[in-house]
Image (cartoon, rainbow, N blue to C red):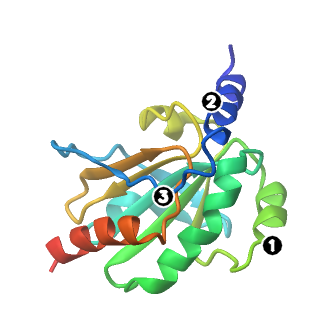
Amino acid sequence: MTVSLALLLCAGTFSAVAGETAFPLISLKERSAAPELKLQDIDGKTRRLSDLRGKVVLVNFWATWCPPCRREMPSMQRLYQSLPRERFEILAVNVGEDDNTVFAFTGTLEPSPAFGLLFDRDSLTMRKWAVRGLPTSFVIDKDGRVALRAVGGRDFDSPNAVEQIQTLLDESR
């Protein structure tokens, strides 16, 4: 089974719970170092997670064909707008799609994403991060460790999610 087919099957599973996006992010008891992430963004610039050390970073793996991914994207932008840029960043990693597909999709969103849109065209980064289905999200603490994760769609600007991320931001003061 190809990675793309496996992700399609997983995405279908998560779409069944798409209305239940208020689930909290899963807090990890033991934080381990986040895997390497070095990808090009929609402007062709190379972005590295390691360059964001000192910030809390939401890393989200997604695709335009994934219904829960499509639904959670606006809440990610609202979260991004509500938190301080100097301490928080979002890297949305598109898996296996081309620039035109992603650009066309994000152009339909309101509000339009202002955070980093990166491309994992060969799915190698997704494999390093052990992503099993889309969407999958990780929140990285200021020390580069995975602190929170979520498999399936989330409402990232819900009070629960904002509180969890704010707690990490408070650790970084």
Residue 107, numbered circle: 1
Indicate whether 16 appears above or below 169.
above
Q: Considering the numbered disc 1 on the image, is that residue within a helix, a strand or a loop? A: loop
Mark 1 residue type: Gly
Nearer to us: label 1 or label 2: 2
Q: Residue at x 44, y 32 (%)?
A: 130
Say whether residue 63 is visible: no
Mark 3 residue type: Ala
Residue 5, numbered circle: none
The residue singled out by tag 2 in the image is 10
At label 1, counting other C-alpha atoms closer than 10 Å, the crowd grade (few under 14, some 14-19, many 20 or more) is: few
Q: Residue at x 48, y 76 (%)?
A: 79
At label 2, counting other C-alpha atoms closer than 10 Å, the crowd grade (few under 14, some 14-19, many 20 or more) is: some
- Image quarter of residue 40: bottom right
Indicate left or right for 150 with 68 as reference. Answer: left
Nearer to us: label 2 or label 3: 3
In space, the residues marked 1 and 2 are separated at their CA atoms by 26 Å
